[in-house]
Amino acid sequence: MAIELQHLTKRQENYSQWYNELVVKADLAEQSAVRGCMVIKPYGYAIWEKMQSILDKMFKETGVKNAYFPLLIPKSFLCREAEHVEGFAKECAVVTHYRLKNDPNGTGVIVDPEARLEEELIVRPTSETIIWGTYKNWIHSYRDLPVVCNQWCNVMRWEMRTRMFLRTSEFLWQEGHCAHATAEESEQRTVQMINLYANFARQYMGLPVIIGVKTANERFAGALNTYTIEAMMQDGKALQSGTSHNLGQNFAKAFDVTFMNKENKPEYVWANSWGVSTRLMGALIMAHSDDNGLVLPPHLAPIQVVIVPIFKNNEQLAAISEVVNPIVKQLEALGISVKYDDDDKRRPGFKFADYELKGIPVRLAIGARDIENGTIEVMRRDTLEKSVMPLAGIADAVKDLLEDIQTNIYNKALKMRDSRVYKVDSYEEFKERIEDGGFFLCHWDGTTETEERIKEETKATIRCIPLDGEEEEGFCMVTGKPSKRRVVIARAY
C-alpha cells in the first residue's frame, strides 16, 4: 500500500481520478458485482457509523423516534402524487415476478412467467408514499400529532453514471417523515432539521455550508419548498449535502390522511421530510483530503490516534509497550479512540504511509531513545507537521491537539470556500469564469426559462437562494430583468 500511495494521482492533474483512486486505496469502498452499486468496506463503514450515531443522537434530542418501513412499494402508491411519480419515474427499479424456475433448455434458471405479481412493486427510491399510506392508520385526532419518525435504510435509484459515495444506484441514508397539525409547526420542523444538518456539517465534518432554499425547478418532487445545505469541494464544484422538504398537505391529500381538530372538524395533516446519505462520505473525502491521502476530522475518525513503536528486537518492544500501554489507557479514559500498532510483520515506514493514506489525525512514534529522553514524536495529519513532546502529560496534549486539528480543518475549508465566492453581474463574465469553478452570487429574474438556459449553456445550476442573503436591488445577469436578491450558482456533483 505504501507503493500505491506514491502513485496516487495529484489533485491538480486529475481531481476526479484522484478521488476515485483515494476511495479504493484508503480502503473505504470498492465496486461491486452489481453495476452501479458499491461495497462499503469496514474502514469506510466505520466512518459512516460515526456519522450515523452522532446524527441519530442529535435527532432524538429533538424528539425524533426511529421506525422502519418496507423496502417494496406498490406502484399504485407511487402514482397517487403526480409530481412525485414524475420526479422518480426514470429511476425506479420494478419487481414484476416473485419466483424463478429451472430452464427446460438446461441453461440455468429463468423467471417463472406464471409467478407474475398482481401489482408491480417499486424498490424504494424514497419512502413518502409507503409512509403516508401507513400514517393514515396511525392518525385520527389532533391528540395523535405530531408524528416525528425517522428510518435508517437503503434506497435504490437507477443511475446511469455512477461514482462511489457521490452517486450510486443503491445508497444508505436516513429519511425523516413528520406529520403536524398546523402549517406553522411543519415549517418549523423543516427549518429545524436543515439547521441541524448544517450544525453537524460544521461541527463534526469540518465542512462550511451555505443554507438556502431551492428554486421551484430544483425542489424535491411533490414539495412546496426544499431547504438545502451546499458545500464547496476543492475543485470549486458544489455538493448538495442535506435537504429538508416542506411537503404541505400534498401527500396527506393523496393518501387521505386527516385528523379531527380541537373543534372536532376534519383537517388534512401537514407534512415534511428530510434526509442525508452516504454522499456525506464523498463530501468528507473531497473537502479535506490531499495528495497523500485522506484527511479526516478527529470528530469522525474511527481511529483518532495511532501509536507506532520503533524497535529492533522483542526486548525493545517489551520496554516500549510498558511505557505505551498506560498512555493508551489514559487516552481511552479521555474518550479518544487509539490503536497501538505493535505488529512486527510490517515495517514502521509502511505503517506511517498506510496511516497517512487513511487519514489518522494524530500519529505517535516512540523508540528506545525516546524512552531514554522521556519524549515521543507527534505528527498531525492535517499539516503533516512533526514535533517532539514530553511523555509526561502526553494524553492531555494529544486531546488538545485533536481539537486544534478539528478547528484547523474547518478554518482551512472555510478559507478555501470564501476565496472562491464571486459576485458577478455579467453573463459573459460568468460563462468565462465558471470554467474554473467556484460559487457565483448572481442576480436572477426568477423564471424557470432563465434557469434552464443557464444550465443548458454553462452546465451550472442555481444551488440555492441563501437564507442569510440580503435583499439587493439588481438586474438578472441573463435577461436584464429586475431582481431583488442574488442566488448561488455553481457546477455541481
Image (cartoon, grey):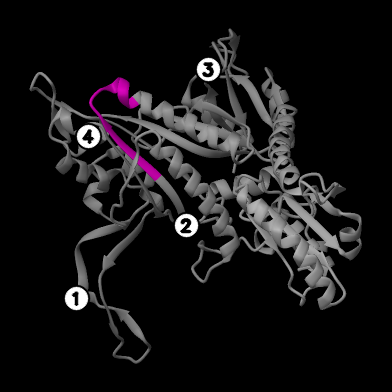
Residue 17 shows in the view = no
The residue that disc 2 covers is 169
Instruction: First in sequence, mark 2 or 4: give its number.
Output: 2
Indicate the quadrant containing the N terminus: top left, top right, bottom left or bottom right.
Answer: bottom right
- Which mark, residue 114? 1
Instruction: First in sequence, mark 2 or 3: give its number.
Output: 2
Instruction: First in sequence, mark 3 or 1: give its number.
Output: 1
Residue at (86, 64) in percent of width and height: 367
**Within 10 Å of the Cα at label 1, are there few (<14), some (14-19), or many (20+) other Cα atoms?**
few
**Within 10 Å of the Cα at label 3, are there few (<14), some (14-19), or many (20+) other Cα atoms?**
many
- Which mark, residue 153? none
Front residue (pair 382, 89): 382
Instruction: First in sequence, mark 1 or 2: give its number.
Output: 1
Magenta-span inclusion, residue 179: yes
Front residue (pair 441, 42): 42
Residue 43 shows in the view = yes
Q: Which residues are magenta?
A: 175-186
Q: Secondary structure at mark 2?
A: loop
Q: Secondary structure at mark 1?
A: helix
* Residue occupying the far left of the picture: 264
Label 2, label 4: how many angstroms apart (C-alpha)? 29 Å
- Residue kind at label 2, given as amino acid type: Ser
Disc number lying in front (4 or 1): 4
The residue that disc 4 covers is 252
Instruction: First in sequence, mark 4 or 1: give its number.
Output: 1
**Within 10 Å of the Cα at label 2, are there few (<14), some (14-19), or many (20+) other Cα atoms?**
many
The residue that disc 3 covers is 445
Residue at (88, 58) in percent of width and height: 370
Disc number lying in front (4 or 3): 4
Disc number lying in front (2 or 4): 4
